[in-house]
Image (spheres, rainbow, N blue to C red):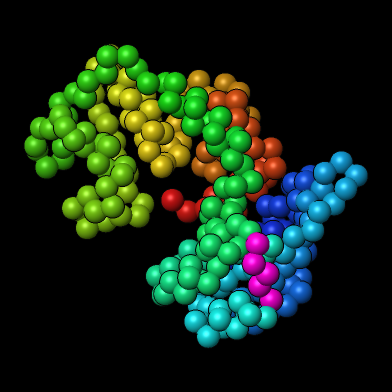
């Protein structure tokens, strides 16, 4: 699946599912491949409040950004959203817009801002799972070493370079006899992760009881259902789970 562009994000995740935010998917101005300007409005009761979003493409050039900063950007009014990969090319967008924009986000952070209340509730629920008197057990790794700290599973989840030459698509499996503390340690890991700038997805057997059987085969629906299970449902993502999660990697 190719990365979603801003009009697709606006159409799939905002216009079709949010009752308070509307963004016109047709740009009011654009420089193809560099930037596009979109008009929108917030709806509050019977009133509407306009805003504008300047979206910066991943291949936006420094010259194009300097030009739009002069021609269409309104300091203190225009919101700026940019493709995260633009940071890998240069930092001109930070210099031009970060301090003067009415909001400056990557695409992922922009989407997260629409579900901040739900995410805060979810994180609070996970933090409350912290098991009392938890101590990391001794774990034997596939290489044959026995470790207690750092917990090998925590390292697998947060270390950007676990030293095995692979990062994306990694899978860790914890094996132990019944009653040895697998669930207890999972609760400890989830609670610890939620204390960091990470939103872990915690799925346990009790969640299946409230999930339609036909959804069990969908990883995306299972992940979104985790929010509902912890009383932080994100209703406007129903039916759009795969597209939303694809547009919010990591």
Q: Nearer the viewer, residue 185 or 48?
A: 48
- The residue furthest right is 46
- The residue furthest bottom is 63
Please name the residue shown 61% across and 77% down the image.
69
Please name the residue shown 74% across and 47% down the image.
17
Q: Nearer the viewer, residue 99 or 32?
A: 99
Which of the 4 quarters of the picture holds residue 135?
top left
For residue 11, say whether it is visible: yes
Query: Residue 157, image x and y in percent?
Result: 31, 42
Query: Residue 147, image x and y in percent?
Result: 13, 32
The stretch in magenta equals 72-76
Query: Residue 46, image x and y in percent?
Result: 90, 44
Above or below, 43 relative to 68: above
Q: Nearer the viewer, residue 164 or 9?
A: 9
In the image, residue 74 lies in the stretch drawn in magenta: yes
> Magenta span: helix, strand or loop, mainly?
loop
Is 115 on the left-hand or right-hand side of 205? Answer: right
In the rendered picture of this protein, how many numbered marks are placed on residues? 0
């Amino acid at each position: 699946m190719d990365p979603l562009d801003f009009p697709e994000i606006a159409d799939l995740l905002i216009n079709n599912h949010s009752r308070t935010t509307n963004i016109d998917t047709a740009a009011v101005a654009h420089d193809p491949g560099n930037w596009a300007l979109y008009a929108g409005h917030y709806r509050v009761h019977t009133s509407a409040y306009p805003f504008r979003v300047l979206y910066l493409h991943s291949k936006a050039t420094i010259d194009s950004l300097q030009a739009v900063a002069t021609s269409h950007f309104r300091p203190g009014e225009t919101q700026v959203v940019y493709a995260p990969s633009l940071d890998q090319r240069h930092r001109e967008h930070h210099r031009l817009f970060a301090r003067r924009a009415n909001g400056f986000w990557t695409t992922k952070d922009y989407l997260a801002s629409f579900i901040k209340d739900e995410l805060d509730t979810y994180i609070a629920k996970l933090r409350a799972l912290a098991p009392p008197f938890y101590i990391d057990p001794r774990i034997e790794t596939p290489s044959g070493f026995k470790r207690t700290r750092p917990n090998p599973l925590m390292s697998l989840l947060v270390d950007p370079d676990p030293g095995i030459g692979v990062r994306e698509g990694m899978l860790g499996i914890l094996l132990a006899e019944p009653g040895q503390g697998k669930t207890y340690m999972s609760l400890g890991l989830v609670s610890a992760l939620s204390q960091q700038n990470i939103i872990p997805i915690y799925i346990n057997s009790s969640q299946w009881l409230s999930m339609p059987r036909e959804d069990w085969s969908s990883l995306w629906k299972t992940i979104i259902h985790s929010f509902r299970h912890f009383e932080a449902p994100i209703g406007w993502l129903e039916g759009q789970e795969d597209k939303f999660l694809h547009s919010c990697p990591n």
